[in-house]
């Protein structure tokens, strides 16, 4: 952030030097929209393979912007090789699939250092080669699709093999072989047989091969001059009247039909409007645009990184944070939290329950349901919160009316809590929440067990496995202790004593016998 503040301060201080380029910031953001839209359309056009319907045919004039990598903005370039984004090429993992090779006209402010180490050993035809012709510099660069500002309808006939040679790009410098230092040397026998072997014949007009070589060099220089003339004229046209845009609809006319054609056409219209909007800025015609554009690009790129890091460090980056806010709002509406996010009495009571759904138990305690029941009826009602198996849950007619009524009130509480959660945006169905939270399959069994009925007799009341019955009753003892602690927090001695009695009623016989495996 300190670096970003320093860049903003320096940019403001240089405001007086940006004569006729005061709107460079607005121009920068408008150019980013054009680059994004152009990449989207060109990627789609090239998805069929080849030159994208002629969009990237050799000699096509394009306008490129590469402020971050090469420090040039809005410069013309000639396409030398089209991108290869076909599935066959991409499966090979080639790094050149998403870029095109272009001859780029470098800005007038560019100066080439004579002792540049990167240019040593590079020749015309190699990537990153920088040459000079007609008092201007050019470079052979790999241009990604996201650096192409626009594709013009202008194209010239050029020999792309002169400007780009794949063999030179793959190995731009000759590496000496140290395997055999005498490799390629002729034997003495061959030397003795022809002592004049290897000597050139000198004539009055020189060697014919030298003449051919000089002629080739002059032809190559002429091709470079012609290409530079095309680029300089394209630059002048763009700064004066603007280059005509290539109609990408014609390039992709055989690729889509129906709705896709309409969507592609609307995207092309949007690109044309964005390009026309960019050309309305004064900065677009500034001769030293790259100097100010690069400064904006540097600080805005850094600003984007800072904002990304801030987002990652903030709560908004958490995937479950919206769910957390919804649940917190729901708890505040129920009185578990106050407006300052402080835990209230109901919240402290809910914190004591860990065995089952704490909200239902808390609502039962505060509504006074358990105060109206006997200890045996309390554990029978609480068993509905612990039993997990699916079973016919119709309550037996032999159960006390108070117990049956309490079970119905528990269902009403569960449905109300599910509706509250749904109202606050949580993906909860009230009826499903009730069914998953309350299962009445062992209410009668636990009630009989708390009344002193033998284990063999209660097993005849249900088809649930004996192990499931034992597990439910042992967990009930833990839940009784938790509800007893809830009564202590609330300050309800009557409920406290009832929960102690309920725990004593179920802690007997084989259910709580010591295991032979651990005793």
Image (spheres, rainbow, N blue to C red):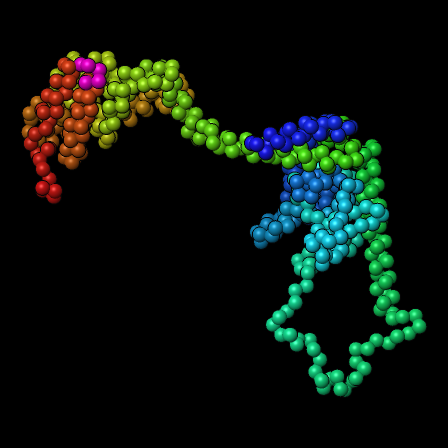
Where residue 271 appears, x then y in whole percent? 70, 32
Residue 483 falls left or right of residue 59: left
Is residue 164 among the parts visible in the rendering?
Answer: no
x, y (%) of residue 157? Answer: 81, 49
Report x, y in % for residue 9.
Answer: 64, 28
Rendering quarter of residue 64: top right
Query: Which contiguous range is marked in magenta?
Result: 488-492
Indicate the position of residue 24 as horizontal and vertical percent values.
71, 29
Magenta: predominant secondary structure element? Answer: helix
**Left or right of residue 309, residue 163 in this image:** right
Residue 428 image-quadrant placement: top left
Query: In the rendered image, is residue 198 in sight?
Result: yes
Q: Is residue 269 magenta?
A: no
Q: Is residue 129 above or below residue 209?
A: above
The residue located at (56%, 34%) in the rendering is 305
Residue at image point 81% right, 34% down = 239
The answer to whether residue 7 is above or below residue 423 is: below
């Amino acid at each position: 952030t300190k670096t970003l503040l320093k860049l903003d301060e320096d940019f403001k201080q240089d405001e007086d030097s940006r004569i006729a380029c005061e709107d460079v910031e607005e121009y920068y953001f408008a150019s980013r929209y054009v680059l994004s839209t152009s990449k989207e359309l060109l990627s789609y056009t090239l998805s069929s393979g080849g030159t994208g319907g002629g969009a990237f045919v050799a000699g096509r004039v394009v306008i490129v912007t590469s402020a971050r990598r090469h420090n040039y903005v809005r410069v013309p370039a000639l396409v030398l090789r089209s991108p290869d984004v076909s599935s066959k090429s991409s499966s090979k993992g080639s790094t050149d699939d998403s870029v095109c090779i272009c001859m780029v006209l470098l800005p007038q402010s560019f100066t080439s250092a004579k002792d540049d180490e990167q240019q040593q050993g590079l020749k015309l035809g190699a990537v990153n080669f920088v040459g000079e012709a007609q008092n201007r510099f050019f470079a052979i660069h790999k241009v990604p699709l996201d650096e192409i500002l626009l594709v013009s309808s202008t194209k010239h006939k050029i020999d792309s093999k002169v400007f780009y040679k794949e063999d030179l790009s793959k190995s731009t410098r000759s590496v000496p072989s140290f395997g055999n230092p005498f490799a390629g040397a002729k034997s003495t026998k061959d030397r003795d047989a022809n002592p004049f072997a290897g000597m050139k014949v000198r004539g009055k007009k020189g060697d014919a091969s030298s003449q051919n070589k000089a002629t080739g060099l002059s032809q190559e220089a002429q091709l470079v001059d012609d290409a530079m003339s095309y680029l300089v004229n394209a630059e002048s046209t763009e700064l004066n009247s603007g280059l005509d845009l290539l109609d990408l609809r014609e390039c992709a006319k055989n690729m889509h039909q129906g709705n896709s054609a309409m969507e592609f056409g609307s995207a092309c219209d949007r690109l044309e409007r964005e390009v026309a909007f960019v050309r309305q800025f004064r900065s677009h015609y500034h001769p030293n645009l790259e100097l100010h554009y690069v400064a904006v690009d540097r600080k805005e790129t850094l600003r984007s990184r800072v904002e990304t890091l801030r987002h990652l460090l903030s709560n908004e980056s958490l995937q479950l944070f919206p769910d957390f806010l919804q649940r917190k709002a729901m708890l505040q509406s129920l009185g578990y939290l106050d407006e300052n996010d402080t835990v209230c009495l109901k919240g402290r009571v809910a914190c004591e329950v860990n065995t089952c759904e704490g909200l239902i138990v808390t609502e039962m305690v505060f509504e006074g349901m358990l105060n109206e029941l006997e200890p045996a009826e309390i554990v029978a009602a609480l068993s509905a919160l612990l039993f997990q198996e699916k079973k016919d849950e119709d309550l037996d007619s032999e159960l006390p009316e108070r117990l049956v009524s309490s079970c119905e009130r528990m269902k009403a509480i569960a449905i109300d809590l599910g509706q509250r959660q749904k109202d606050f945006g949580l993906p909860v169905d009230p009826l499903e929440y009730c069914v998953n939270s309350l299962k009445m399959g062992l209410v009668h069994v636990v009630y009989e067990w708390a009344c002193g009925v033998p284990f063999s007799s209660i097993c005849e009341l249900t088809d649930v496995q004996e192990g499931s019955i034992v597990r439910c009753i042992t967990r009930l003892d833990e839940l009784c202790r938790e509800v007893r602690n809830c009564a202590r927090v609330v300050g309800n001695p009557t409920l406290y004593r009832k929960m102690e009695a309920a725990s004593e009623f179920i802690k007997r016989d084989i259910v709580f016998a010591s295991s032979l495996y651990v005793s």
